[in-house]
Image: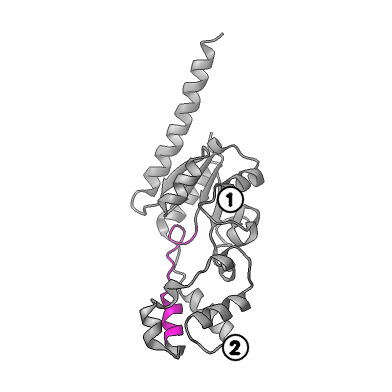
């Protein structure tokens, strides 16, 4: 029986783009030629920030250095605002599926390789204790340990959980420890979840029938 459905956030709950941040820093760079040659912010390593190893101020300093931008304290807020501009409205398909799951007593969880300063963008989707982030756990998907840690926090078995992500590598990692996995597609997510839940229930019923033959 499925008890939890875990959603990734960016590109699953809502669209996200770093283009506003890239445009802002492009206006600030002192070396536009190198900025363009290095694909702007796309060549920056966000992983230490996403793992919670550095704070927002240090992140901004490193990012400015990477982009040949003069760092000054006020730029932290401007970088933060530009990053928030990249957050779009929640996908109606995702919200619809979440509501259906709630009506079937399946809890909604979030698991994201999150940028810490965007923690306020998904808080209305579920309870705080069901939101899991890379910067709090100190791990990034597709590290299988992050899924194991979430299962422990939920006190759940892998077969009781569905995980949904837009990146196939993250889904495969979850499936490798027995979690049901779905690669997110807006057009098919409702059918994909229904099929996954129905298949899970069928497997349980099939197992129960098989065990009954032993008596």
Q: Does the magenta-highlighted stretch encompass residue 192?
A: no
Q: Mark 2 sits on what residue?
A: 74
Q: Position of residue 162 (x, y in %)?
A: 50, 43
Point out the tag, 1 or 2, that comes first from the N-terminus. Answer: 2
Q: Is disc 1 placed on a helix, strand or loop?
A: helix
* Label 2 packing within 10 angstroms: few (<14), some (14-19), many (20+): few
Q: CA distance from mark 1 to mark 2?
A: 35 Å
The quadrant of the rendering that contains the C terminus is top right
Q: Is residue 45 left or right of residue 52?
A: left
Q: Is residue 189 left or right of residue 6?
A: left
Q: Does the magenta-highlighted stretch encompass residue 14?
A: yes
At 42% from the left edge and 65% from the top edge, which residue is drawn? 15
Q: From this viewpoint, which residue is outermost toward the left?
A: 187
Q: From this viewpoint, which residue is outermost toward the top?
A: 215
At 43% from the left edge and 38% from the top edge, which residue is drawn? 196
Q: Position of residue 133 (x, y in %)?
A: 59, 58
Q: Of the residues tagged 1 and 2, which is closer to the observer? A: 1
Q: Is disc 2 placed on a helix, strand or loop?
A: loop
Q: Nearer the viewer, residue 158 or 50?
A: 50
Q: Nearer the viewer, residue 136 or 45?
A: 45
Residue range (magenta) = 9-26
Q: Position of residue 23 (x, y in %)?
A: 41, 82
Residue 151 found in image quarter: top right
Residue 56 found in image quarter: bottom right
At 36% from the left edge and 81% from the top edge, which residue is drawn? 36
Residue 97 in sight:
no
* Label 1 packing within 10 angstroms: few (<14), some (14-19), many (20+): many
| Residue 172, numbered label | none
Residue 126 in sight:
yes
Q: Position of residue 16 (x, y in %)?
A: 44, 67
Residue 24 found in image quarter: bottom left
Q: Mark 1 sits on what residue?
A: 146
């Amino acid at each position: 029986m499925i008890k939890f459905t875990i959603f990734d956030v960016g590109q699953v709950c809502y669209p996200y783009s770093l283009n506003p941040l890239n445009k802002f820093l492009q206006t600030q760079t002192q070396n536009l030629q190198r900025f363009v040659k290095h694909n702007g912010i796309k060549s920056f390593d966000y992983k230490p920030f996403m793992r919670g190893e550095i704070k927002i101020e240090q992140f901004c300093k490193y990012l400015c250095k990477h982009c040949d931008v003069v760092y000054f304290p006020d730029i932290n807020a401007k970088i933060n605002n530009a990053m928030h501009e990249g957050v779009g409205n929640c996908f109606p398909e995702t919200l619809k599926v979440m509501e259906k799951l709630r009506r079937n007593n399946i809890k909604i969880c979030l698991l994201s390789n999150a940028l810490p300063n965007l923690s306020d963008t998904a808080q209305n989707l579920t309870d705080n204790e069901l939101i899991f982030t890379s910067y709090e756990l100190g791990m990034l998907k597709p590290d299988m340990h992050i899924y194991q840690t979430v299962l422990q926090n939920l006190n759940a078995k892998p077969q009781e959980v569905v995980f949904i992500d837009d990146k196939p590598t993250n889904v495969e990692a979850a499936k490798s420890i027995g979690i049901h996995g779905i690669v997110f597609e807006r057009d098919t997510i409702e059918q994909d979840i229904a099929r996954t839940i129905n298949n899970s229930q069928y497997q349980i019923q099939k197992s129960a029938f098989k065990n009954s033959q032993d008596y």
